[in-house]
Amino acid sequence: MEIISVIIPCYNEEAALPYFFKEIRKVSDNLSDTYNLCFEFIFVDDGSKDKTLSLLHQFVREDQRTRYISFSRNFGKEAAMYAGFFHAKGDYVVLMDADLQHPPAMLEEMYLCIKQEAFDVAAARRISRKGDPPIRSFFARRFYHLINKISKAEFVDGASDFRMLSRKAVHALLEIGEYNRFSKGIFGWIGFKTKWIPYENVERVAGETNWSFGRLLLYSLDGIIAFSTAPLAIASVVGILFCLAAFIWMIVIVLRTLSWGESVAGYPTLACLLLLVGGSIQLSLGIIGQYLSKTYLETKRRPIYIIGEMSEESEDEEIH
Ligand code: UDP
Ligand code: MG
């Protein structure tokens, strides 16, 4: 019998989890009957500070298809997803948010795409950004435009993390063991035949989003740095342009002094130039620093996450 693993990263989701669990069990029972399938639910508690973990204990008691992994602290959704993929045993693995923003009703279509149409990935794509603040949508669109220009991996606007993958695709994902994980890029980078299934964005069922605008901005910077070295090239080009300009300006000054003699005028020009050149040097250093810091973290080879506790099965892997 084929197995579908459902991975659910949870961070402070005590309010939404009971609704989610009820819904996913209903949908999976239906699917199990229709297609002769088995399910496993893997909840990854990303260091929640509320009652999420005790809810998970309760779920395990209620339904033997449930397993959980609980991190020693908050490692971020990326780490939680990786842990889920690592521990999933299914032939198909699907990633879902705990807040019911990813409708479980879509599982059937995703499954059929992979099973019957020979896709390796079936991913949900938001057709509108309704419900998002306009400023957030604006920056999101700019981000996708920019990153597709400067990176080789394909970034699809509106692509969500809600997706089902074949075992083959999961295997490829696990091969990418980098510490600075940016899934939206990694999913595109591994390739494979992907079916995009459109869906309308729905409001979260309960609780609050964990992503502030500032956190999203930093996350998008991470994405650019992880999947493109264009900013480094830009820094060098700006440097070269400034050198050229300075050289030409030097000749102009020498010629001017020779023909009209010295003058003390021109202080504003000097001040502006100083600021501009100083600023661009600072910017280039900053860009290089960003890459350096990522390289630094990568070379440390720290684990992506640390498990505090998990449900009985497969306790062989405490750290990964
Ligand atoms: N999440 C997580 N770790 C974090 C932040 C979020 O595991 O540090 C989980 C969260 O519990 C939810 C999913 O990631 O299941 C998406 O988070 P959220 O709904 O806050 O994001 P949004 O839908 O607003 O993008
Ligand atoms: Mg959400």
Image (cartoon, grey):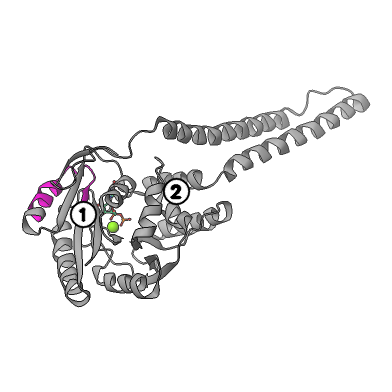
Name the residue carrying label 1: 42
Disc 1 element = strand
Vertical placement of residue 32 versus 207, above or below: below
Vertical placement of residue 300 versus 81, above or below: above
Spot occupied by residue 183 in the image (x, y as percentages of width and height)? 40, 52
Range of magenta residues = 42-59
Res. 162 image quadrant: bottom left
The response on whether ligand 1 sits within 8 Å of label 1 is no
Q: Is residue 141 left or right of residue 239?
A: left
Residue 222: within the magenta?
Answer: no
Residue type highlighted by circle 2:
Ser
- Name the residue rendered at 27%, 51% in the picture: 84
Where ligand 2 lies, by quadrant?
bottom left
Neighbours of disc 1 within 10 Å: few (<14), some (14-19), many (20+) = many
- Name the residue rendered at 21%, 37% in the picture: 72
Q: Label 2, label 1: how many angstroms apart (C-alpha)?
A: 27 Å
Are the residues flagged by discs 2 and 1 in contact, CB closer than 8 Å?
no
Name the mark on residue 220.
Answer: 2
Residue 51: within the magenta?
Answer: yes
Residue type highlighted by circle 1:
Ile
Res. 298 image quadrant: top left
Viewer-closest of 88 and 131: 88
Residue 15 seen:
no
Q: Report the mark closest to the observer, 2 or 1.
A: 1
Viewer-closest of 149 and 119: 119
Neighbours of disc 2 within 10 Å: few (<14), some (14-19), many (20+) = some
